Amino acid sequence: MKYRILGTSGLSVSEIAYGNWITHGAQVDNDIAYSCVQAALDEGITTFDTADVYSDTKAEVVLGQALKGIRRESIELCTKVFHPTGKGVNDRGLSRKHIIEGCHASLNRLQTDYIDVYYAHRFDPAVPLEETFLAFSDLVRQGKVLYIGISEWNAEQIARGAALARELKVPLIASQPQYSMLWRIIEAEVVPACEQEGIGQVVWSPLAQGILSGKYSPDKAPPQGSRASTAAGAPFFDRLAGQWMRPEVLLAVSKLSTLAQEAGLTLPQLAIAWVLQNPQVSSSIIGASKPEQIRENVKAAGIRLDLDLMKQIDQTLDGWIEYDPGKTG
Ligand code: NDP
């Protein structure tokens, strides 16, 4: 494993992080979840990503159990707040009430005293940003949160948040957007806005939820047990990756396999290495339904792709790459 500094902070993260969206507490049994976490640790992954909302709060519980007994200083444990975690009017959003209560609930479920990076999972237009940042800042001063992050905020929201973080002297160091060979919208505005503020990118779905593993073929049904075919995964997959389940796109993706082979990589490794070529990306969060996927995918760390290969990737996917900064994940 290789490690990078997150933004201009002092925090090191593993180039490849392990996230448990859809899988833990839903798609896979707990014993498989535990073996995935063990595989991640064995491969040198130190950065773990979850959220209160994943699997209706069960994902945090499973991750907390899986990491029990691990030396806390040896990992970076990251979670998020914003999406509804209950039926109450205050069980959601970025109000002071929900951030403080949400943090306490996450600490409980994760069985830890502090969160390394606590993300605002989305921007909340219904709450004054000053209120949100004051709540985050109090958690930082109490030692319950070490660093703050934002996820899927646009450039203007990031600039406003960074100004408040500076004023309150709290470390806003991470942005967590979707980024892959197929989904490059952060390049136009989000990355430059973050770079100016010293905020690093911890990107999600580098495989476009499995599309860029090459496992989905234009002329076959999704493989059994894959995210596209399971009750836990299909609704998310259809909503966020459905746009790529077209024969033309899948055919283009299948052509990438030859490029990967020529580079001595598997297609998932090529796709993950691709996001890590962007120097503003500090870490790429991978998901996995099996420990073997983690063992394969971590080999993307530290790989340099030459410019000619980068160009061939662009040519192969030409017409199917999303750049529009108006779109969000
Ligand atoms: P990926 O794009 O890495 O997709 C992971 C899925 O692809 C796996 O669960 C598996 O699904 C399949 N896969 C992985 N490796 C292989 C392989 N080698 N061969 C074949 N199939 C493979 O990332 P995710 O979409 O899972 O997102 C990663 C993390 O990012 C999440 O866990 C979460 O922490 C974070 N995230 C954050 C969001 C945000 O709003 N901030 C939103 C979404 C995710 P299967 O085997 O089931 O087909």
Image (spheres, helix red, strand yellow):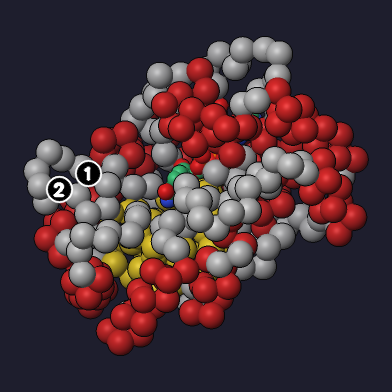
Left or right side of 196 for 91: left
The residue where tag 1 is placed is: 84
Mark 1: secondary structure: loop
Three-letter residue code for mark 1: Pro
Mark 1: give few (<14), some (14-19) or many (20+) Cα within 10 Å: some
Q: Earlier in the sequence, mark 1 or mark 2?
A: 1
* Relative image position of residue 146 (x, y in whole percent): 33, 70
The vertical placement of 80 against 269, above or below, is: below
Q: Is residue 257 visible?
A: no
Residue appearing at x 26%, y 35% in the figure: 56
Q: Is residue 137 above or below residue 104?
A: below
Q: Where does residue 226 sit, x and y in percent of width and height?
A: 54, 22
Which element is circle 2 on? Answer: loop
In the picture shown, does residue 144 fall above or below 39? below
Is 103 left or right of 324, judged from the image as shown? left
The label number, if any, that marks residue 45 in the structure image: none
Q: Residue at x 47, y 47 (%)?
A: 329
Marks 1/2 in contact by CB < 8 Å: the verdict is yes
CA neighbours of label 2 inside 10 A, class few (<14), some (14 to 19), many (20+):
some
Where does the image place residue 137, in percent across and percent down from the top left? Answer: 24, 75
**Residue 220 occupies which quadrant of the picture?**
top right
Which residue lies at the image location 59% right of the left edge and 54% below the top edge?
324
Q: Which residue is mark 2?
A: 91
